[in-house]
Image (cartoon, rainbow, N blue to C red):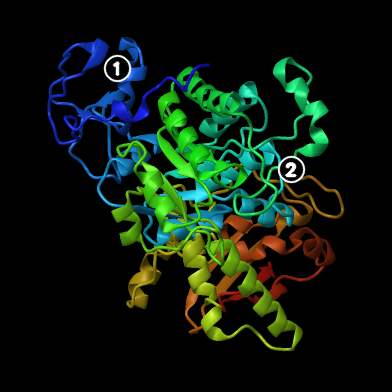
Amino acid sequence: MKLSGINHESIISSSFSKTHKTHTLSSSFSSAKVPNFKTLPSFQKLSTHSHQSVKKVFIFNPKSSIGGETNKSGTSKTPAQLLRNLLDSPGVHQGPACYDGLSAKLVEKAGFDFCFTSGFSISAARLGLPDVGLISYGEMVDQGRQITEAVSIPVIGDGDNGYGNGMNVKRTVKGFIKAGFAGIIIEDQHDLSLQLGGHDVYRLVFFEKVSPKACGHTQGRKVVSREEAVMRIKAAIDARRESGMDIVIVARTDSRQAVSFEEALWRSRAFADAGADVLFVDALASREEMKGFCEVYPLVPKMANMLEGGGKTPILNPTELEQMGFKIVAYPLSLIGVSVRAMQDALTAIKGGRLPPPGSLPSFEELKETLGFNAYYEEEKVYATRNSQSFSQRESINIYGNQERTKDVTEERDQSEQDNVVEVVTPEVYYGADGSKGRFSGIWSRQLRVKVTGKDGSEKLEIRIPAGFLDGITNVVPALGGVNIKSLLDDAAGEPGGKKLLDFNDTMGDRIQVFLE
């Protein structure tokens, strides 16, 4: 593949502007005009594409906000579409890196428009191990699916080096699409797969000389050849096309530390020409390098990595990053870092016989609100039926099937006969300890009187049912749900009328009495 013959800088023309409503295409496209459309950042790469690919770099500019956008058909926009709108909007956008559903939810609740997943953090949180290539593709996809399902904001996933050759890269991209990711980062570090087909045989020969895949700011990084690095991006683009989706491809190179700054710039240009949507050079070592990187294809969005706690890249504020030309910024260690420290402090306090300080520990109510308990309860009401309602949650109908009490006790008593209706559906018929089955023999000649008295002394319920029908009684008085009425009836079979079988207070404080008559 010949990339060295491309004059990358000559592609950018000062006559092209995002604000123009009509663009004239030079070179082999000879003045083709497309009115009322705007260019994507990849417009500057048109001289290396065929005429057929021109259609892919123009989109209609919808006049709506990033959040909650809909297509012309009225359907909600995909995560990838939301992320592309974000990339095309003014300013620099911050994306903290999460590692599970809870951390992602916290990012969204804090008001961020998108977030990243961090391979470093996921390896730490899920495995308790360093990010040196130990976590697998399957584990990353599984964790990613839990993250994307927890939030509505777009998530850019850490696709590592694609976990192998071009075919592995395609599988990785398709898996990330199915997991709900809006974007995926593909890097050019070496992998340790020992595949025995095609050009991958060389990995067997040089296996001992290639260090494991490493975190971007740690030691021992090695990158693949230029050709293989570009082929990974091409494979990612092909996987996206075959899936019929529009996941954002973030092309990352680690060649700044593995080779040189110049090599990193060369690879960035080549990735852009291959079709990458966002460019990312990890571990840039100075402000000058960061600025120089942003001058490569200025219209292609650039990603910055603010490694907290002492990485190789200078930590700059969003305003400085925007002025340099960066579009999105990752903060990979903030959440996992403060989580580790907070857990260490809490464990130290507990071991010393104390609890974590109140300022560091949210209340139980705050935790429930963060996790969505209240929202869950509200939505649960939509699907609740009378029989499935919690004993303590019934509101408009009290626990005994009566209408809600009014202050007028007389009026309540007048309607008691209408309210206290017992519905018995397919009852279990109980014949009694003696086995008699005659309708008026044994237990069938007796009846149960159930009386419920409120805490204030008011009579809530008093009903009588044949002692042989036990199946429906708990629908009327749920507090009897754990009582073995059959056993009580057997014990009292020979007792005279008026025998008290039960007398207790339920969890609501009401007095429950059951008599055998």
Figure quadrant of the C terminus:
bottom right
| Mark identifier at residue 54 | 1
Foreground residue among 6 and 454: 6
Q: Residues within 10 Å of mark 2 (few under 14, many from 20)?
A: some
Circle 1: element type: helix
Is residue 470 visible in the rendered structure shown here? no
* Residue 430 percent coordinates (x, y): 75, 50
User: Could you tell me which residue is drawn at 39 percent across and 67 percent down?
Assistant: 404
In this rendering, position of residue 10 left or right of residue 14: right
Extreme-bottom residue of the structure: 353
- Left or right of 216, for residue 315: left
169 or 13: nearer the viewer: 13
Q: Amino acid at mark 1?
A: Val
Residue wearing tag 2: 212
Q: Nearer the viewer, residue 424 or 232?
A: 232
- Please, what is the three-letter code of the amino acid marked with disc 2? Pro
Front position among marks 1 and 2: 2
The local crowd at label 1, few if under 14, some if 14 to 19, many if 20 or more residues have their Cα within 10 Å, is: some
User: Going from the N terminus, do you reach mark 1 or mark 2 first?
Assistant: 1
